[in-house]
Amino acid sequence: MIKVLFLLLLSLAGSLNLLAQKKYDNQGALIRSDQSQQSIYLMFSGHDFYEGFEHVLSVLEKKNIKGSFFLTGDFVRKHSDLIQRMVAEGHFIGAHSDKHLLYNAWENRDSLLHSREVIKKDISDNLIELRKLGLEPSLFLPPYEWYNQKVVEIARELGQETINFSPGTRSNADYTTPEMSNYLGSNEILESIYTYESANGMNGFHLLIHPGTSPERTDKLYFNLDSLIADLMEKGYSFEKF
């Protein structure tokens, strides 16, 4: 009995230690995983553009790395061949909403732009499409990577933990196009990654890259994925999926 209790206490201590190594933002989303390990989690999201997915999957296959893909219902319905490849190659696939709705206002994060029922249905419909393919995701990346505590609660009601990229780099700006005031080229984005890593380290970091971007952006960050992975591996990092 004492031995059993001791083992249970050890297990509980290990779980608490792992939880302590994770980081959540003030809205309740997981934004960094186990920081005790020198591992990076590559995240990819997909909705309307898809031109870079084959390239990204080929790079991951070449490097023998498993990534985490968060896909909308619209993407799932249109690209079953890509998803079959992701599954066959052992990647994680999670939810990213059904229609890629903007759930809450940019200028007032606390304000929902849709009712709870509409948001819940949008997430639920995405899960239905994934389940048709035999997938049972447990992680949800909100559309536009923008959400509030209410969205996190709605996702939790559907058995989903909300996740997002780790702040600190500008990798998520790879969707921008030259006419946007916040446009960043790939060299600037890569520099932000290397600068952050040098100053802070990237243990448990969630690094988001968009494998599909507007045709108006000809400078595609994902074409640098191979060299980025090689550079980070040289610094001692491994790559994990969720």
Image: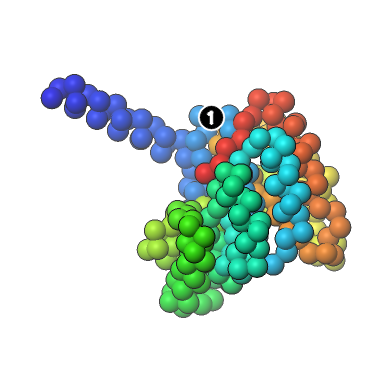
Q: Please tell me in which quadrant of the rendered image residue 204 appears.
A: top right
Q: Is residue 150 left or right of residue 46?
A: left
Q: Is residue 59 left or right of residue 109?
A: right
Q: Is residue 6 visible?
A: yes
Q: Is residue 28 left or right of residue 233?
A: left
Name the residue located 15 percent from the left edge and 22 percent from the top edge: 2
Whether residue 94 is situated above or below residue 117 in the rendered picture: above
The residue to which callout 1 is attached is 37
Q: Nearer the viewer, residue 51 or 229?
A: 51
Q: Amino acid at mark 1?
A: Gln
Name the residue located 59 percent from the left edge and 60 percent from the top edge: 71
Q: Nearer the viewer, residue 6 or 167?
A: 6
Q: Is residue 205 visible?
A: no
Q: How many marks?
A: 1
Name the residue located 45 percent from the left edge and 55 percent from the top edge: 136
Secondary element under disc 1, as helix, strand or loop, is loop
Count neighbours of disc 1 (C-alpha within 10 A) and say few if under 14, some if 14 to 19, many if 20 or more: some
Residue 73 pos. (x, y %) = 57, 67
Residue 1 pos. (x, y %) = 13, 25
Q: Nearer the viewer, residue 182 or 37?
A: 37
Whether residue 166 is situated above or below residue 115 in the rendered picture: above
